[in-house]
């Protein structure tokens, strides 16, 4: 039986108790509804009145005659032996609500078998390759597993007078966003409107871990994470030129890792490894590279194939238009 939960406190309590990912938090669904035309549904799957699995599903209405697309970021969450049953329950739920596809990107290991009827998607939303840190290890062991240069830079940036603090005030978040804009311009990637980040800060509350590195009161770099007891998940980060010179992002990230450990979070997820300098920086903190199972689709209608073919074209068109706007 599937039961929809419509109360934030009840949902986040369930998520916390069952080891769900931060992208399954109530706040993440609200953010995507406000800024991405998604409608969130929070579903608890029960058997004999006992919880066996859950998922925050995001639904997007497509143009006629396509119906709706359903997407689960870093979910569902359930015991490993219940995964097949949970996926079938969610498939039935989505199909009964006019879905043409159910797309999921769970934090499950690549080596696991996949149920019949699902297909690997070419249209990913989240990057499946990442590096994690097991926070059950001692702090000394975590440090020892980082690259030698990284350990030197952590100590060196702290010795140079770089300090790190957690921020919540809007004026401090504005400093972080100023750094983010300069980082995006330097590295040529796009950002949401500032209102998106301010809404996330408001909606996620204490689940936000926003850290700002400074020297003599001057902002240098920032890191923005989301936390549940199972996972601390890096969302955003950046450094200005002064921060790069002082390598402030090294002691900044180390501070975030040690704070997560102190809070008894299970793992620290550095979120997303590509073939770039940022990914090399992330890898230098952890020798535990992992590949989640990736993006998988359950076709629910013959129209699924038309939509999946059109998505890459539409995405490329938007990217070109965004580049033209910036000229």
Image (spheres, helix red, strand yellow):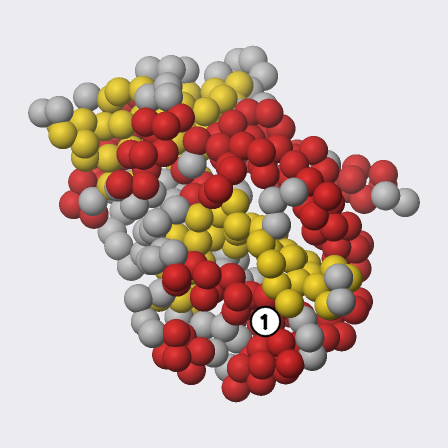
Quarter holding the N terminus is: top left
Res. 304 in view: no
Location of residue 201 (image quadrant):
top right
Locate residue 111, reporting x and y percent.
29, 59
Res. 203 in view: yes
Residue furthest out toward the front: 216
Locate residue 52, reporting x and y percent.
19, 35
Density class for disc 1 (Cα within 10 Å; few <14, some 14-19, many ≥20) is many
Name the residue rendered at 25%, 51% in the picture: 113
Residue furthest out toward the right: 327
Locate residue 59, reporting x and y percent.
47, 24
Q: Is residue 153 left or right of residue 175?
A: left
Name the residue rendered at 46%, 28% in the picture: 58
Given residues 183 and 212, the one toward you in this image is 212
Q: Is residue 97 left or right of residue 176?
A: left
Name the residue rendered at 49%, 47% in the picture: 226
Q: Is residue 193 left or right of residue 285?
A: right
Location of residue 90 (image quadrant):
top left
Name the residue rendered at 47%, 52% in the picture: 233
Q: Is residue 274 left or right of residue 120?
A: right
Task: Tell me if residue 227 comes above or below residue 159 in the rendering.
Answer: above
Given residues 132 and 223, the one toward you in this image is 223
Task: Identify residue for label 1.
Answer: 251
Locate residue 294, reporting x and y percent.
42, 50
For numbered disc 1, what is the local secondary structure?
helix
Quarter holding the C terminus is: top right
């Amino acid at each position: 039986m599937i039961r929809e939960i419509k109360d934030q406190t009840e949902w986040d309590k369930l998520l916390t108790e069952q080891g769900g990912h931060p992208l399954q938090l109530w706040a993440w669904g609200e953010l995507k509804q406000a800024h991405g035309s998604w409608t969130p549904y929070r579903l608890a799957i029960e058997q004999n009145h006992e919880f066996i699995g859950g998922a925050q599903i995001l639904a997007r209405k497509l143009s006629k005659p396509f119906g709706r697309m359903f997407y689960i970021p870093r979910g569902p969450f359930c015991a490993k032996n219940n995964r097949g049953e949970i996926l079938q329950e969610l498939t039935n739920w989505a199909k009964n609500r006019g879905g043409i596809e159910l797309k999921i990107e769970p934090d499950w290991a690549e080596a696991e078998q996949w149920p019949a009827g699902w297909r690997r998607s070419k249209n990913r939303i989240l990057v499946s390759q990442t590096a994690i840190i097991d926070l059950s290890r001692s702090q000394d062991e975590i440090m020892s597993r980082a690259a030698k240069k990284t350990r030197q830079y952590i100590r060196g940036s702290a010795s140079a007078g770089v300090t790190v603090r957690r921020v919540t005030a809007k004026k401090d978040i504005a400093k972080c966003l100023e750094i983010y804009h300069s980082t995006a311009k330097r590295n040529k990637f796009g950002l949401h409107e500032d209102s998106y980040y301010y809404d996330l800060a408001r909606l996620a509350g204490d689940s936000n871990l926003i850290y700002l590195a400074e020297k003599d009161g001057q902002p240098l770099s920032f890191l923005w994470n989301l936390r549940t007891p199972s996972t601390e998940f890096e969302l955003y980060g950046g450094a200005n030129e002064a921060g790069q010179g002082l390598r402030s992002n090294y002691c900044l990230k180390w501070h975030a890792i040690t704070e997560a450990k102190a809070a008894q979070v299970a793992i620290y997820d550095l979120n997303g490894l590509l073939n770039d300098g940022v990914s090399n920086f992330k890898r230098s903190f952890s020798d535990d590279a992992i590949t989640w199972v990736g993006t998988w689709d359950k076709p629910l209608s013959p129209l699924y194939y038309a939509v999946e073919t059109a998505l890459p074209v539409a995405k490329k068109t938007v990217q070109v238009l965004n580049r033209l706007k910036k000229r």
